[in-house]
Image: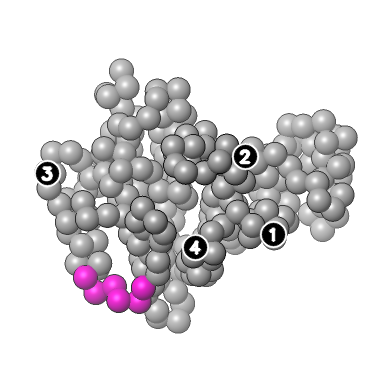
Amino acid sequence: MAEAGETAESLAYRVGVDPKTAARWVTPGRVPHPRHRAAVSAALGRAVGELWPDVVRRREPVWFLPWAEVERRADTLRSFQPSVLPGLLQTEAYAHAVLSCGPLADDAVEGYVASRVARQAAVFDRPRPPLTVFVVDEAALRRGEPEIMQPQLDHLVAMAQRPRLLLHVLPLRAGFHPGQAGPFVIASTDDGEDVAYLDDQAAGRTTTDVAALWQVWDTLRSVALPRDQTVQLLKARPWLT
């Protein structure tokens, strides 16, 4: 707070909490509610993981840690999701709904939501964020209750305005496509290495064998909507009217 020129009072004003609440955050072991962490991170110019590393570390599965490190140092991220929205683009309410559908205990869901928000900050709040390109199947946009999806779609529209973020919807009219085999992300780093992340029902894994995934990615990008048409579809959202 001192390095950023903030006091408990000024930080509380920016985040929208009582000054006494902000003052308690400097006490070891006192961590803001997940909905406030991203705002504090942005106000102080630090990643959530820097401010509260224990929260992030203890909520990420062991098998996910290698990918989390790749994600944090990537220059470019290319992500495809066929059934749910990418974790890096999820609102807290959407993430909570998605995670609550799985095997997590109720008291663990909040921690995983916080971890997901921290990942977003670690990627997008850098001085120079990576180029991120997302291709999302239209089916993912249609899944979810309106009270969750309306603000989530608003969030996608806002994120799509970022200069180094490209969002493309793969329309249902595209028919069958190779991405139906499952979601994946390809990360390119400054040392020229490409690393992919693949997810399944049990756990995710990383691999440097990405040649086949590049072919799938090129196919998906070729049939996805351009950026402007994607934003138009997200704003119109006819399936929610």
Quadrant holding the C terminus: top left
Give the distance between the C-alpha atoms of the residues marked 1 and 3, in whole angstroms.
43 Å
Q: Label 3 crowding class (10 Å Cα cut-off): few <14, some 14-19, many 20+?
A: few
- For image coordinates 41% across by 61% down, the residue present is 204
Q: Which residues are magenta?
A: 207-212
Give the distance between the C-alpha atoms of the residues marked 2 and 3, in whole angstroms.
40 Å
Q: Is residue 161 visible?
A: no
Q: For this rendering, which residue is in front, 83 or 201?
A: 201
- How many labels sit on residues? 4
Tell me where residue 6 appears, x and y as whole percent.
82, 47
Residue type beneath disc 3:
Gly
Q: Is residue 18 visible?
A: yes
* Mark 4: secondary structure: helix
Residue type beneath disc 1:
Pro
- For image coordinates 24% across by 68% down, the residue present is 214
Q: Label 4 crowding class (10 Å Cα cut-off): few <14, some 14-19, many 20+?
A: some
| The magenta stretch spans residue 36 | no
- Residue carrying label 2: 107
Q: Label 2 crowding class (10 Å Cα cut-off): few <14, some 14-19, many 20+?
A: few
Q: CB under 8 Å between callouts 2 and 4?
A: no
- Residue carrying label 4: 64
Q: Which mark is residue 203?
A: none
- Looking at the image, residue 149 lies above or below residue 72: above
- Residue carrying label 1: 53
Give the distance between the C-alpha atoms of the residues marked 2 and 1, in whole angstroms.
19 Å
Name the N-terminal-most of marks 2 and 4. Answer: 4
Q: CB under 8 Å between callouts 2 and 3?
A: no
* Mark 3: secondary structure: loop
Q: Which mark is residue 175?
A: 3
